[in-house]
Image (cartoon, grey):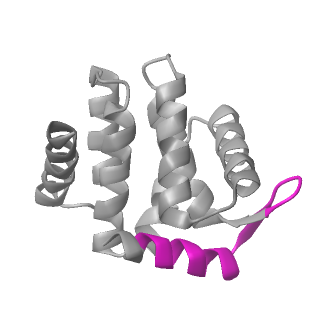
Amino acid sequence: MLKGFRKTALKAMGAGKKEQSAHQEFDRTVIAAATLMVELAHLDTDFDESERKHIIDIIRNRLELQPDQIEELLSVAEERHEEAYANWIFTKTIKENFDLAERSELMTYLWEVALADGELHDLEADLLLRIGQAIDLPENERIKSLLRVTARLSAS
């Protein structure tokens, strides 16, 4: 399943609508996924280093980008977060470009970000519910993604 997300993201980086940052060009779907992670991390008004590090780890491990590309992508995602609360633009991009398995995998990543600081805040849980609905992820898939993350956290 992780390969599916990476494959789509890498394919997307080579084709489709692009957004130019100062030094890099990223596909909108890659920016959308990163921005949703940043949005979630900011939701409890305390975007701490553990959440930022976790987002960087996800990007590095799943997309295999170079450190400068990761920082640039994260910078673009943070700019998008600051520019608009209309994160539903990004969920529309995900819904239209990711298949069910990839949407489920993204939801798993979002749960990882939400739980990275060891707490799940009500606002984070609410946003995850709304994102899951907005990307047309069935309830059973949303539950499975949460269970995958909690199982990993319990094992570590």
Q: Is residue 23 magenta?
A: yes
Residue at the extreme top: 45
Where is the N terminus found, in terms of image quarters?
bottom left
Q: Which residues are magenta?
A: 5-24
In this image, 42 relative to 100: left or right? right
Q: Residue at x 48, y 63 (%)?
A: 62
Q: Is residue 63 magenta?
A: no
x then y, percent, for residue 147? 13, 48
Q: Residue at x 30, y 24 (%)?
A: 118
Residue at the extreme right: 22
Residue at the extreme front: 156
Residue at the extreme left: 140
Q: Residue at x 39, y 38 (%)?
A: 113
In this image, 32 relative to 133: left or right? right
x then y, percent, for residue 122? 27, 22
Q: Is residue 47 above or below residue 94?
A: above
Q: Is residue 85 above or below residue 12?
A: above
x then y, percent, for residue 31? 62, 56
x then y, percent, for residue 35? 56, 46
Q: Judge whether residue 9 can be spotted in this image.
A: yes
Q: Quadrant of residue 82?
A: top right
Q: Judge whether residue 134 can be spotted in this image.
A: no
Q: Residue at x 50, y 48 (%)?
A: 57
Where is the C terminus found, in terms of image quarters?
top left
